[in-house]
Amino acid sequence: MTDTKISVNFACQRCLHPLNLDESFNYLGEHTLASLILPIHSNPDIDIESQASSLDLFVPPFRLTEYENGASGFMLISDGGTESLNHQMRVRANLFDTLSSYSNFDHPLCDECTDTLLELLEHQLKVTESDWVDYKEYLKKLENETNEPSIEALERELEDYRNEEQRLLNELEALQSEVKATTEALEEQKLEQKRLKEEEEKYWREYTKHRRYVMLTEDDYKSLECQLHYAQQQLDKLKKTNVFNATFHIWHSGHFGTINNFRLGRLPSAPVDWSEINAAWGQTALLLNALARKMNLTFEKYKVVPYGNHSYIYVYADHRELPLFGVGGFRYMWSTKFDDAMNAFLDCLQQFKEEVEKEDPGFCLPYKIRMDKNNPEKSGKIEDSANGNCYFIKIQFNSEEQWTKALKFLLTNLKWGLAWVSSQFDSIEDESGPQQIAPTTSAPTTTSTPNR
């Protein structure tokens, strides 16, 4: 079986598939070409003879392959069948060029593309026929209409149109004037907008500045509020604090009465150093002097002078000082100045008690003070209300135990006086200032809790 070589020179202009043309396309007569270039519709205005020149146009669909010799520039062609091939190509190219010139589609086309094209043309033909029918009916309708407008009606209509035109021109002129006025007003508004924008920027700058000041002021205000709250808390705490109780703490340690942890007295089993006793007497003198100042009390005959561990009692009558401190060991034959000072101190405490009773008749001390002005030797006693025993405040002709107990009773009486003055002071503060928590006015005891 031998393969037949088929030469393909043309392709479909739509799908570009190669085409194998029939041999009948190789030879076309002049009459056939003339019939192909005739117009489809019969129009007497078209000169058929003038279209004959289009037959001479030749647009080849492709170019023959050129083989160039770089030096000579000659074309090499084969010897066999050259004239027949060129003639066939010219005939086919002339045919397809003619068909493409007188249609909206390029040729050649394959069978499938031709069928698609025919379907499209049939659809266009139907649409065109439908339009033709519509136009034909409308033409008949126009031909049947015999009412033609008169010249007078047309002139009146023209005059109306001219009047309408003049009216519209007047409106246009008025609108142009309005546009001009609006443009001027718009320019003024733009200038006003610019001015307002500058004022707004200035306002915001001022607002930011004042806002910063406000924030700083608020911070300072919050800080001052915190400081004030802290100061108020401290003030309330101080107001609730009893200055006498905080300054003078009177308690007991075994058989000894104590003031600010200083023991007042001596025992054979507990020989307290005289420096501690003198310091305790200094605190006691300071407490009695403070209570007297609070009561605006001036003692008769005596003046209590607190001077630490060298405090003394000043006697107005003799202009002499009685030492309220000791300097040596305990002896029965002791200097009477110390005993006189302790006796004078007890007399001042009795005066304080009498002054308090003037303001508060219900006030009384837990231990009675016995002072005999006619017989000074028997004065200076403190009575125990539980058993009626009396204890001398003096050292001379007295035992250490009784002297220490008398001093303990003395401190207990001072604590009662301190409590009364504190309660009166707190009640005055309650009436004149913020509400305070007044301490109890009940009498203090010296045996409820151990020493601090």
Image (tube, grey):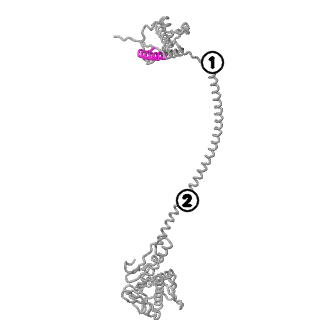
Is label 1 in a helix, a strand or a loop?
helix
Residue 368 placed where, x, y %?
Answer: 42, 87
* Residue at x-position 43% and y-position 81%: 416
Tell me which corner region of the image, top left, top right, bottom left or bottom right, holds residue 398.
bottom left
- Dot 2: within a 10 Å radius of its alpha carbon, few (fewer than 14), some, or many (20 or more) residues? few
Residue 168 placed where, x, y %?
Answer: 63, 29
Q: Nearer the viewer, residue 37 or 7?
A: 37
Q: Nearer the viewer, residue 43 or 222?
A: 43
- Dot 1: within a 10 Å radius of its alpha carbon, few (fewer than 14), some, or many (20 or more) residues? few
Residue that sits furthest to the left in the current view? 1
Residue 423 among those drawn in magenta: no
Q: Most prominent secondary structure in the magenta stretch?
A: helix
381 over 260 or under it: above or below: below
Residue 41: in sight, yes or no? yes
N-term-proximal mark, 2 vs 1: 1
For the C terminus, the image quarter is: bottom left
Q: Nearer the viewer, residue 186 or 315?
A: 186
Query: Could you tell me how many numbered marks the image carries?
Result: 2
* Residue at x-position 65% and y-position 36%: 180
Q: Which residue is mark 1?
A: 151
Residue 98 placed where, x, y %?
Answer: 50, 11
Which amino acid, mark 1?
Ile
CA separation in Å, label 2 and label 1: 93 Å
Instruction: Read off the magenta span.
Output: 108-131
Q: Is residue 353 left or right of residue 386?
A: right
Q: Which residue is mark 2?
A: 217
Q: Nearer the viewer, mark 2 or mark 1?
A: 1
Which amino acid, mark 2?
Thr
Residue 109 among those drawn in magenta: yes
